[in-house]
């Protein structure tokens, strides 16, 4: 079997798309496509199912990868005995990265690991992973399709909060919704995704209010309401210190607060880099106490 065909197959298998594999191999996408077609003809088996974004390995592709990955990686190591460590590319929501993730990974960086961190919304980050840009993505929702595998990392609790001055106006009110009717709302998006979800899950009704202020991210929301801009719904992990110190006030304490499961997604083939496994395992261990 032509080793070039096998190397090409493994690059596509690990990256999840012809587009992502091409620059890794120094080839054009049509050349990658042609090589995979040739390998399919020689093996008599379909290797990948084409998806709108990337490809999904067939059962035979999984079996072929298990047979050839080890030997090909050993050959690559012989060809590059002095190769430098490959950085781990990690991405996720900016707030979770700052509050939880980066502090948890400090020991790995201090131990000469190399880490490249990007922030953003889950869907764009997952699309970038399909294109080969990230090894690990922390996402606030499971990826669609079967091309990317995810595992639960932690459950994030959402809380309804405001500055003390605004909270005093509604103190003692049995109807939180009515008490907040004239209080400005601060969010990070015009469609109010987190606040709307809280209203549906906790109060069983649709939110009709409009945001008084929209800001770039949840950290900006936290800063604004701490300064007295109004109220919002935030992850408890983000504002725990502010609640403990009295800079923010919890407006409502439901028996079952809304939860969102944060997942850890790994790029297919990324486990060939042992540092990716170290980062992954460290995150899963640290998340037990989040």
Image: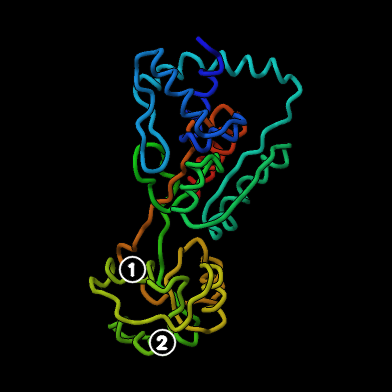
Question: Mark 2 = which residue?
Answer: 183
**Of the pair 33 and 216, the residue shown nearer to us:** 33
Quarter of the view holding residue 145: top left
Image spot of residue 215 (x, y percent): 52, 74
Please determine whether, in this image, residue 249 is positioned above or below residue 153: below
| Residue displayed at 44% across by 18% down | 39
Near mark 1 (Cα within 10 A), the count class, few <14, some 14-19 or many ≥20, is many
Looking at the image, residue 65 sits to the left or right of residue 286; the answer is left
Residue 231 vertical position relative to residue 102 in the rendered view, above or below? below
Horizontal and vertical percent position of residue 204: 23, 71
| Residue 153, percent from left and from top | 45, 45
- Check disc 1 and report its element: helix, strand or loop: helix
Task: Name the residue that disc number 1 marks.
Answer: 198
Q: For marks 2 and 1, give the CA distance.
A: 17 Å
Residue 165 in the image, given as x and y percentages of width and height: 49, 87
Question: Residue drawn at (56%, 43%), measured in percent from left and top?
Answer: 133
Residue 210's quadrant in the figure? Answer: bottom left
């Amino acid at each position: 079997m032509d080793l070039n065909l096998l190397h090409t197959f493994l690059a596509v298998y690990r990256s999840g798309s012809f587009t992502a594999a091409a620059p890794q191999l120094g080839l054009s996408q049509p050349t990658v496509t042609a090589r995979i077609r040739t390998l399919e003809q020689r093996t008599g088996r379909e290797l990948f199912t084409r998806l709108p974004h990337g490809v999904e390995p067939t059962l035979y592709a999984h079996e072929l990868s298990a047979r050839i990955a080890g030997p090909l990686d050993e050959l690559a190591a012989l060809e590059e005995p002095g190769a430098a460590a490959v950085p781990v590319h990690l991405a996720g929501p900016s707030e979770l990265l700052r509050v939880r993730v980066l502090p948890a990974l400090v020991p790995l960086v201090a131990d000469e690991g190399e880490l490249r961190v990007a922030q953003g919304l889950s869907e764009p980050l997952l699309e970038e992973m399909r294109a080969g840009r990230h090894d690990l993505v922390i996402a606030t929702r499971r990826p669609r399709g079967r091309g990317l595998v995810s595992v639960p990392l932690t459950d994030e609790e959402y809380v309804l909060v405001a500055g003390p001055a605004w909270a005093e106006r509604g103190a003692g009110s049995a109807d939180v919704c009515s008490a907040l009717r004239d209080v400005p709302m601060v969010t990070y998006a015009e469609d109010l995704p987190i606040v709307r979800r809280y209203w549906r899950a906790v109060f069983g009704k649709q939110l009709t209010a409009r945001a008084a202020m929209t800001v770039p991210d949840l950290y900006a929301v936290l800063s604004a309401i701490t300064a007295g801009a109004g109220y919002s719904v935030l992850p408890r992990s983000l504002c725990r210190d502010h609640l403990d110190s009295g800079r923010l006030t919890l407006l409502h304490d439901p028996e079952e607060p809304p939860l969102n499961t944060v997942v850890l997604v790994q790029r297919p083939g990324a486990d060939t880099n042992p540092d990716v496994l170290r980062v992954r395992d460290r995150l899963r261990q640290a998340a037990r106490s989040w």
